[in-house]
Image (tube, grey):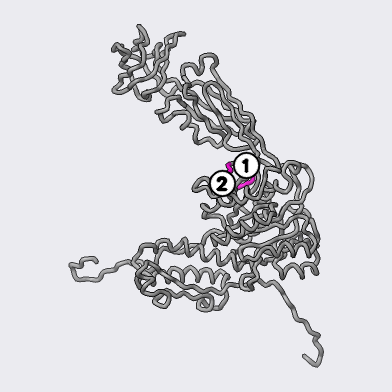
Amino acid sequence: MAEYLSPGVYVEEFDSAGPPLSGVSTSTAGFVGLAERGPVEGLPQLVTSMNDFRRKYGSYLSDNQFGNYRFLAYAVEQFFTNGGSRAYIMRVAPSDAKIASGKDDFFVVTAANPGSWGNQVEVHIEPSSKAKTQIFEDLGGGKYRVKNSAGFLEGDTVVFSSGDSKTTAVVRSARDNVIELSASLGEDVVDTGLVPQKTLSTLEFNVHVVFGDQSETFENCSFNASAPNYVNKAASGSELVSIEARRDADAAALFAEYDRRVVTLSGGSDGSLSGVSASDFIGEDRGPGKRTGIQAFVDNDEVSIMAVPGVTIPEVQLALVAHCENLGSRFAILDLPPDKTKVQDVLAYRDIFDTSYAAMYNPWVQVFDPLEKRNIFIPPSGSIAGVYARSDNTRGVEKAPANEVLRGVTGLAVQYNTGEQDILNPKGVNLIRSFTGQGIRVWGARTLSSNALWKYVNVRRLFIFIEQSIKVGTNWVVFEPNDERLWSRVHRTIDAFLTRVWRSGALQGSTPAEAFFIDISRNTMTQEDIDNGRLICVIGIAPVKPAEFVIFRITQKTSESA
């Protein structure tokens, strides 16, 4: 409370609510699938373009090698083509894939992840030095007063150069411009000239990792295990390899025969189709930083759309749906098997699922394959994820992602007619159809839920958007005093957010009161709740539904009815 001493009028500011609540992004996708290279455990990696994907995960996989498991790259490309801008990727590798490696007398080099790509990696080693100085005085016993001892560390290998003569030793200590070495450098080592002819230098090396048009450089690496530039540490940031120095590696011997060394890798393999199983895609929860497959997305808070392109194993798709349901913050896009084209076969497969957190699309779509130089059919999930992102960014998540043109698609595996859609649409199978003069369009917006309240994709995704926005935007409430003043602030924060959502057209009603209600009071919390630290807010919203059936009732106008 401010202390007022002089009579007068005082104006003070106060916070009537918490920080403004902003909506979360709904257009970030997550994909799981086979790729040429890339990490197979840990956190999914962000890509923002197809070029970014190629740099991190390689290019397209061949049909002969991996069949219908090869479509990750195609799906990601379609995602960006259709309007997506951010995607997280989790690579899966066959169990029989091998990691390339190479070694010599000084280094053991291992590719960062499995695949034949590692066989193309080369590691070039060339001499360098992080510190150089002159010796001003020989103090005896291997001790020398130097011009500057900065950069010389205990354990460093050094070389004394005088003309063509070179002598190596190891630093025992270096402080106050006095360096003690493991051995004497001999006589006549002093040089005080402005242009020195005799120098004492640390002996390090630069590491250049080369893979195609990618390269990484780690400068002034050392075999000194206690130094910050120890090669194992210095090269730990490589995305291509891991490098370990052999225990007996000697810097003095490193370039005894050659001024440059090259370590080549071999033994990497992509594995085979027989090495791929459902469990690879489902993944394992090995703890933070070690999760694989779908499980790796547990630690990601940005993804709101997920797909495993082309993988139509029911166990995998059910695992993806369960993942989305358990988190409650993302929506799954499912492909049908390419051979499920007849209506009855489609319905039989669709009956495996009952969830509001997923939608199913059919048929597969035709695109040009840059690898095989011909048109091929690919699963639609990548294209649909791009349409979701495009619709969200241009219209909002409340707009059903339907009646949208598929970009980069030249044909369909099956041309369904209206009669067939009349059967499939009510069952929650969203068709992709070609209309003369209107292109190829998404022509359905149903979830796979048997609950009529959750039958529309945009309704479920609108609820996800609102729930996650409130969750993220009210984090400031945690540990605040749980009383009426806090309840009022939370009410005003959520009310302001939902009013903006209503004004955007996402909620029904001509007034905010018709669109939503918020109750945070003694009606929603007992004293026991308050005593146990629980703040409970009840929110109701009225989402808009898509105009799925547009009906014009036309009658004949006669002179008598005029």
40 in magenta: yes
- Residue at the extreme left of the image, as rendered: 5
Residue at (65, 45) in percent of width and height: 34
For disc 1, the neighbor class at 10 Å (few under 14, some 14 to 19, many from 20) is: many
Residue 386 visible, this orientation = no
Tag 2: residue type? Answer: Gln
| On screen, residue 511 above or below 23 | below
Q: Where is residue 207 drawn, in percent x and y?
A: 52, 27
Q: Main secondary structure of the magenta part?
A: loop
Q: Where is residue 419 drawn, in percent x and y?
A: 80, 69
Residue 217 visible, this orientation = yes
Report the magenta residues as a range. 39-50
Foreground residue among 129 and 268? 268
Q: Secondary structure at mark 1?
A: helix
Which quarter of the rendering shows the N terminus? bottom left
Going from N to C along the chain, the mark reached first, 1 or 2, is 2
Q: Where is residue 116 drawn, in percent x and y?
A: 66, 34
